[in-house]
Amino acid sequence: MKRVESVFDIIAEPNRRAILSLLVSSQQSVGEIERQLRMPQPAVSKHLRVLREAGFVESTVDAQRRLYRLKPEPLHEVDAWLAPFRRFWSAHVDALERHLDRMDQSTPTKRKTRKRRRGPNREPGKGETK
Amino acid sequence: MKRVESVFDIIAEPNRRAILSLLVSSQQSVGEIERQLRMPQPAVSKHLRVLREAGFVESTVDAQRRLYRLKPEPLHEVDAWLAPFRRFWSAHVDALERHLDRMDQSTPTKRKTRKRRRGPNREPGKGETK
DNA sequence: AGAGTATATTCTTGTCAAGGTATATAAAGG
DNA sequence: CCTTTATATACCTTGACAAGAATATACTCT
């Protein structure tokens, strides 16, 4: 019955990220989350359930309330996945920003379209210069 | 027509994460990715398109090939989102590992199931010290 | 030009999860 | 007990999206 969702699936949901961000400062009850995020209570409960089952949060009972707080492990996992990339960009980010199109030395077959535009542009394959 | 997906949506897909991990070592052509990940070529192209439009990768043309390489910014964004949590767990992870449910020290209201805290939480001393 | 190679783009289909609404459970208090 | 407060769950509908197969585009070489 349980989908084994990866931690990445869990944090893909914006409301869940919002909940996690709320909890980073301190534990909160469902009602407090509901009010601060202005989202319907069932939605909060459902997301909290997902977060709980994935180990992102845990809860303790306080009368009718449930106090939710963060658990670090799953986010640690995300952090661990990021590690190699962190190394990558700390090594390359400056070079990238200076010359993006400098690092090709693979196998220039013939003439090549050496440069690609940088910036907020998309693929040049659409309006090809042909 | 364009869904503007968050970076978290993008990396929620396992194949896309695999592609990114491949590219961290060096740029690769579509065919190389296809072979290493053993996934159908259209799938690779489609995921690459998503990654490209989200700014995770960029490509240069090499004859009929396209060489894809990483761009750091979007993953940086993920990293930035993680920052507050990193502070959180580095502060609490040891305490958590010792006793998770230890942190109550307030007025017990009446009879209770076990333990609980009352009041509008917001415990001081936590949160960001910035 | 045609053949071969490399990559991109349809179109369709099935799945799955988020949102909404209503209702269920549980505890507290009069 | 009945009501109020707090949270959880069930049901349903809808939309997003990944996978698959087939086809299109693009470039190279003979």
Image (cartoon, coloured by chain):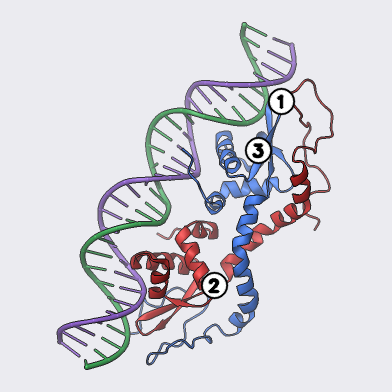
Chain colours: A blue, B red, C purple, D green
Q: Position of residue B126 (x, y in %)?
A: 80, 49
Mark 3 vs 1, N-terminal side: 3
Which amino acid, by three-letter code, is at mark 3? Arg
Whether residue A87 is visible = yes
Chain at numbered mark 1: A
Which residue, given by chain and number where applicable, does mark 2 sit on?
B24
Which residue position holds label 3?
A35
Mark 2 or 3, closer to the camera? 2
* Image quarter of residue B3: bottom left
Q: Secondary structure at mark 1?
A: loop
Tag 2: amino acid: Val
Marks 3/1 same chain: yes
Q: Nearer the viewer, mark 2 or mark 1?
A: 2
- Where is D7 relative to A120, above or below? above
The kind of residue tagged 1 is: Ala
Which residue bears the numbered disc 1?
Answer: A63
User: Spatial distance from mark 3 to mark 1, Cα to Cα?
Assistant: 19 Å
Q: Residue at x 80, y 42 (%)?
A: B123
Q: Are marks 3 and 1 in contact (CB under 8 Å)?
A: no
Q: Which element carries disc 3, helix, strand or loop?
A: helix
Q: Position of residue B58 (x, y in %)?
A: 48, 75
Estimate how packed mark 2 is, as few (under 14), some (14 to 19) or many (20 or more) residues with alpha carbons within 10 Å.
some
| Residue neighbourhood size for the residue with mark 3, other residues' Cα within 10 Å, grouped as few (<14), some (14–19), many (≥20) | few
In the picture, measured across the screen, residue C12 lies left or right of residue B72, that is left
Q: Nearer the viewer, mark 3 or mark 1?
A: 1
